[in-house]
Image (cartoon, grey):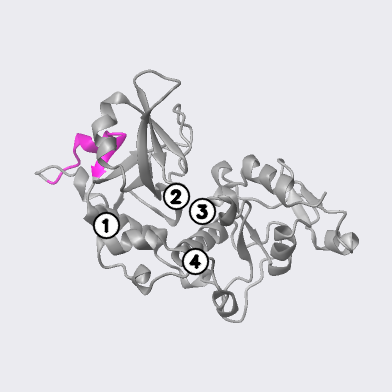
């Protein structure tokens, strides 16, 4: 097994769905097959407007021929392993390329940097993941939030970031993933509640807003910004219980099952629409919103 970089653009002509699959031509088959069972990192080229650079990781489960296109293949990701980095990792920093494997013997960037699928060393993987998951204290949960028991009890070794295998464990750790998801969502929403428009900062300098999964992790919801929404504590509680939802145009819906809908509407920002990130790729995805309306919202 060997790790790999997969280049992906938001305007890709390929049938890509990063959390689930990556389509590629036959010329990259050998490289992709080498990464089966290991981690891959997604990279968005610098030519893309507002490029996120290295922006996510996932574990590659298998490679299958594309049933809809000859000489094309699909890299299938292991469910629940996709994780978007809270920090976009640029191609280069002051020390040169983050991905040292793209350099040739003379220390110059080689043609490998243009390959849509290319091998990634453990060292480069660790460097990228460290930068992508680096925590900003301003986005960490409040003490009372961290005291809540999480869905999975993680082994302490999940917090160690010294070796490749341990970093791989951290990529799968529920606690690490929750913290990364929170940081990514809060940054995308500028620490502002999408429903109320409130941006409250506590005495410790941390935002009171929380990161909610639209489709919960327990229901196969991925850790990606488009499956997240920033909500204040009370609104988060109502959202999870189906008293509030959004339509595909981000208009706010208040359930008739609420015992005091008038008071709920008083909390809603004057526009009646959720305040969402400017970049389309970070906005709540219609598929996740539809799932919430069909499975949670008490219409």
- Which of marks 3 and 1 precedes in the sequence? 1
Which residue is drawn at the image coordinates 68% and 66% (left, top)? 232
Q: On the rendered structure, is 54 left or right of 11?
A: left
Residue 124: which numbered mark, if any? Answer: none
Q: Give the labeled residue for mark 1.
A: 94
Q: Quadrant of residue 102?
A: top left
Q: Give the labeled residue for mark 2.
A: 82
Could you say whether the residue bearing mark 1 is in a helix, strand or loop?
A: loop
Tell me where the magenta segment starts and ends, as one range.
107-119
Horizontal and vertical percent position of residue 86: 46, 58
Q: Give the labeled residue for mark 3.
A: 223
Residue 152: which numbered mark, if any? Answer: 4
Tag 4–tag 3 contact (CB < 8 Å): no
Q: Is 186 drawn above or below residue 48 in the view shown?
A: below
Which residue is drawn at the image coordinates 27% and 36% (left, top)? 33
Could you say whether the residue bearing mark 2 is in a helix, strand or loop?
A: loop
Horizontal and vertical percent position of residue 211: 60, 61
Camera-side mark, 4 or 3: 4
Real-space Cα separation, disc 1 to disc 2, in angstroms? 29 Å
Tag 1–tag 3 contact (CB < 8 Å): no
- Which of marks 3 and 2 precedes in the sequence? 2
Real-space Cα separation, disc 4 to disc 1, in angstroms? 38 Å
Camera-side mark, 4 or 1: 4
- Which of marks 2 and 1 precedes in the sequence? 2
Horizontal and vertical percent position of residue 147: 56, 78
- Which of marks 2 and 4 precedes in the sequence? 2
Is residue 124 in sight in this rendering? yes
**In magenta segment, residue 109:** yes
Tag 2–tag 3 contact (CB < 8 Å): yes
Real-space Cα separation, disc 2 to disc 3, in angstroms? 7 Å
């Amino acid at each position: 097994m060997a790790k790999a970089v997969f280049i992906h653009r938001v305007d890709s002509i390929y049938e890509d769905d990063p959390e689930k699959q990556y389509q590629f031509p036959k010329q990259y088959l050998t490289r992709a097959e080498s990464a089966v069972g290991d981690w891959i990192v997604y990279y968005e080229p610098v030519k893309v407007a507002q490029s996120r650079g290295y922006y996510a990781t996932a574990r590659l489960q298998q490679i299958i021929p594309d049933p809809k296109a000859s000489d094309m293949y699909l890299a299938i990701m292991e469910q629940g392993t996709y994780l978007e980095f809270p920090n976009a990792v640029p191609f280069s920093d002051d020390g040169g390329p983050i991905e040292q494997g793209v350099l040739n013997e003379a220390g110059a960037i080689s043609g490998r940097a243009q390959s849509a699928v290319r091998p990634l060393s453990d060292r480069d993987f660790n460097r990228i993941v460290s930068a992508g998951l680096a925590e900003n204290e301003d986005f960490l949960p409040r003490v009372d939030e961290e005291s809540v028991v999480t869905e999975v009890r993680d082994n302490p070794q999940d917090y160690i970031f010294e070796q490749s295998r341990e970093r791989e464990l951290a990529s799968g750790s529920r606690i690490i993933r929750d913290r990364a998801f929170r940081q990514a969502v809060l940054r995308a929403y500028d620490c502002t509640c999408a429903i109320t428009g409130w941006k409250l900062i506590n005495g410790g300098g941390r935002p009171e807003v929380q990161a909610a999964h639209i489709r919960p992790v327990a229901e196969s919801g991925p850790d990606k910004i488009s499956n997240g929404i920033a909500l204040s504590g009370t609104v988060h509680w109502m959202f999870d219980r189906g008293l509030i939802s959004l339509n595909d145009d981000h208009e706010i819906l208040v359930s008739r099952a609420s015992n005091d809908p008038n008071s709920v509407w008083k909390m809603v920002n004057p526009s009646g629409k959720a305040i969402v990130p400017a970049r389309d790729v970070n906005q709540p995805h219609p598929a996740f919103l539809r799932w919430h309306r069909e499975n949670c919202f008490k219409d």
